């Protein structure tokens, strides 16, 4: 396909980037720590950590993982943390030790946690103390040898840490750390490794950096194998596309959504470390008033989020009264940006809300709208530098200009494949092309519009929910004959999970029974908000449930 989108690039944006400019993310990180050492890198709960401090603490952790735990290059370490200063320390510590990061959502139900730990073969985990109970329930079925447990305030100044940790201990119910025989305090691990030399093994672009789990439309979650080259490439692509608007060492980005999600990991964390920026981490994204109050303390220049976040922030009076004079860039990802939200955002802040397109298998950014965008255009933007796209029809051939086709992507950001799932890899990767499963169109200027995202996926407050997983859980409930799961519009969360259930003959199955099972096996955002009992489900001639009719 001719790269007509290059003609729509803003000035100074190159057609291509060099994905081999850096050998690894570790090289990028260590370069930034040298260049921006005294500048603030991450801020959380009123304390800012400098690049020098981040380098020292991440090195101490890397030493501990290598020399005390004996972990070898390529072994996996899980991180199960919200947006705290411990996250970047753990992230770069694991990478600097030559190990592979397995990001795990802190909201994961025990069954989800167990699957990812078992599938990845993780040998250690860094986890928040408040989440230990869930790990204790499943750890015997995994290969976890050491659990590094951190309290929320561990990296705050001494007295503030004491107060925060004591307060959390009193208001949160949790299992005692002693319940895990292999547990060690995160702070103790840092102290043990502090001041010792790191065995800096040579990493190259083809070494794995992340096993990033993403649910498929069928089957259990799969681990996308993202190499250092994949991640460096996507970081360079993003910086090349929006970088001319930003100045090295001077930008402040607000990070509301958790860094363990790949969009924010790449765009907020990695890109801004590369650029010497300051990341302001908000640890409680659900409290919009608290978020607005924290934002008031900073002259932030960049903010990212999803449509639901921007919409809900603008409904908060404290946020509406902020000074947006320093704001340069706002990027929406994860869900489609609604026109009404984008227009209200521009009216309030004076800058456009740029929609993007991403998926875990592409590290994740594929398209972003240009920074000089005029009015909202309903597209997900232009393909990033060094990115090829094709729109393919049902037979696999390219569709005519303006036609609809499956969006296929090729570029240095495309994953190596799925972890230990060659069949699934072969299904989605074909001759170097990533088959996204999303139907799109492209206009004559090269702007991509998603016509249908993966039709069955439900997006709840920016989190992806796949119907098959919900149906598997509900279908295991005694008295369920058939079940189908769909997403329906919801004012607060964008979409809500709804299930339609057919009872077994003579059964007296109740909604409460179904919900009790869901609460045991699903993360909170996946639990159905609506339950409808029906006599039957609409089906095709082949016997497949027609979810679009249920919607």
Image: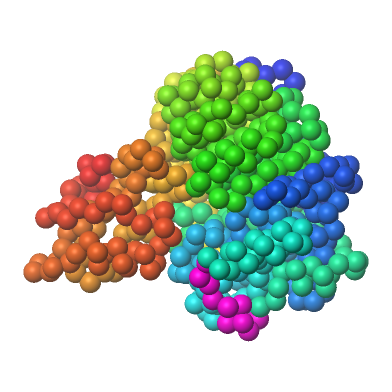
Location of the C terminus (image quadrant) = top left
**Looking at the image, can residue 542 be seen?**
no
**Looking at the image, can residue 57 be seen?**
yes
Instruction: Pinpoint residue 145: horizontal percent, then vertical percent.
Output: 66, 78
Q: Residue at x 58, y 68 (%)?
A: 169
Tell me how the rendering is colored: rainbow
The quarter of the displayed image where residue 550 is located: top left
Q: Is residue 502 highlighted in magenta?
A: no
Range of magenta residues: 172-182
Instruction: Pinpoint residue 74: horizontal percent, then vertical percent.
Output: 72, 65
Instruction: Pinpoint residue 273: horizontal percent, then vertical percent.
Output: 76, 43
The quarter of the displayed image where residue 534 is located: bottom left
Is 16 displayed left or right of 113 in the figure? right
Q: Considering depth in this image, is 282 or 223 the residue closer to the camera? A: 282
Q: Residue at x 19, y 64 (%)?
A: 510
Q: Is residue 181 highlighted in magenta?
A: yes
């Amino acid at each position: 396909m001719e790269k007509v989108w290059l003609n729509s690039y803003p000035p100074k944006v190159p057609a291509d980037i060099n994905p081999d400019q850096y050998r690894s993310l570790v090289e990028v990180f260590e370069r930034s720590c040298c260049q921006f050492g005294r500048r603030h890198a991450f801020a959380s709960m009123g304390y800012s950590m400098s690049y020098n401090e981040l380098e020292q603490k991440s090195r101490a952790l890397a030493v501990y993982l290598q020399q005390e735990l004996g972990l070898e290059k390529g072994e996996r370490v899980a991180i199960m943390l919200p947006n705290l200063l411990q996250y970047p320390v753990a992230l770069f510590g694991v990478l600097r030790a030559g190990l592979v990061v397995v990001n795990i959502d802190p909201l994961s139900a025990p069954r989800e946690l167990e699957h990812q730990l078992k599938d990845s073969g993780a040998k250690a985990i860094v986890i928040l103390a408040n989440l230990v109970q869930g790990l204790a329930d499943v750890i015997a079925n995994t290969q976890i040898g050491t659990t590094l447990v951190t309290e929320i305030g561990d990296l705050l100044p001494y007295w503030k840490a004491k107060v925060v940790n004591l307060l959390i201990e009193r208001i949160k119910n949790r299992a005692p750390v002693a319940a895990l025989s292999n547990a060690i305090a995160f702070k103790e691990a840092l102290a043990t490794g502090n001041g010792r030399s790191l065995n800096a093994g040579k990493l190259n672009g083809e070494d794995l950096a992340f096993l990033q789990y993403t649910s498929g439309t069928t089957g259990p979650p799969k681990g996308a194998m993202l190499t250092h080259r994949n991640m460096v490439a996507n970081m360079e692509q993003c910086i090349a596309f929006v970088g001319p608007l930003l100045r090295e060492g001077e930008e402040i980005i607000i990070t509301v959504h958790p860094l363990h999600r790949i969009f924010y990991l790449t765009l907020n964390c990695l890109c801004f470390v590369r650029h010497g920026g300051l990341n302001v981490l908000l640890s409680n994204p659900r409290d919009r008033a608290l978020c607005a109050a924290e934002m008031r303390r900073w002259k932030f220049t960049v903010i990212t989020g999803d449509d639901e976040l921007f919409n809900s922030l603008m409904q908060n009076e404290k946020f509406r009264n902020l000074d947006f004079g320093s704001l340069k860039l706002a990027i929406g990802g994860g869900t489609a940006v609604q026109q009404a939200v984008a227009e209200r955002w521009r009216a309030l802040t004076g800058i456009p809300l740029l929609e993007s397109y991403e998926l875990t298998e592409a590290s994740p950014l594929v398209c972003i709208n240009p920074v000089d965008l005029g009015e909202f255009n309903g597209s997900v933007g232009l393909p990033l530098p060094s990115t090829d796209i094709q729109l393919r029809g049902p037979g696999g051939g390219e569709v005519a200009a303006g036609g609809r086709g499956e969006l296929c992507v090729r570029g240095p950001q495309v994953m190596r494949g799925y972890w230990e799932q060659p069949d699934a890899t072969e299904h989605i990767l074909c001759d170097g092309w990533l088959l996204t499963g999303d139907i799109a169109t492209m206009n004559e200027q090269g702007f991509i519009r998603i016509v249908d995202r993966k039709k069955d996926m439900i997006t709840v407050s920016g989190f992806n929910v796949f119907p098959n997983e919900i149906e598997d859980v509900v279908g295991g409930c005694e008295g369920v004959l058939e079940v189908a799961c769909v997403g329906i519009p919801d004012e607060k969360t964008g979409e809500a999970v709804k299930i339609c259930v057919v009872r077994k003959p003579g059964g007296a199955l109740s909604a409460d029974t179904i919900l009790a099972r869901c609460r045991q096996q699903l993360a909170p955002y996946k639990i159905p908000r609506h339950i409808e009992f029906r006599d039957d489900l609409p089906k095709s001639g082949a016997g497949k449930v027609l979810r679009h009719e249920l919607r």
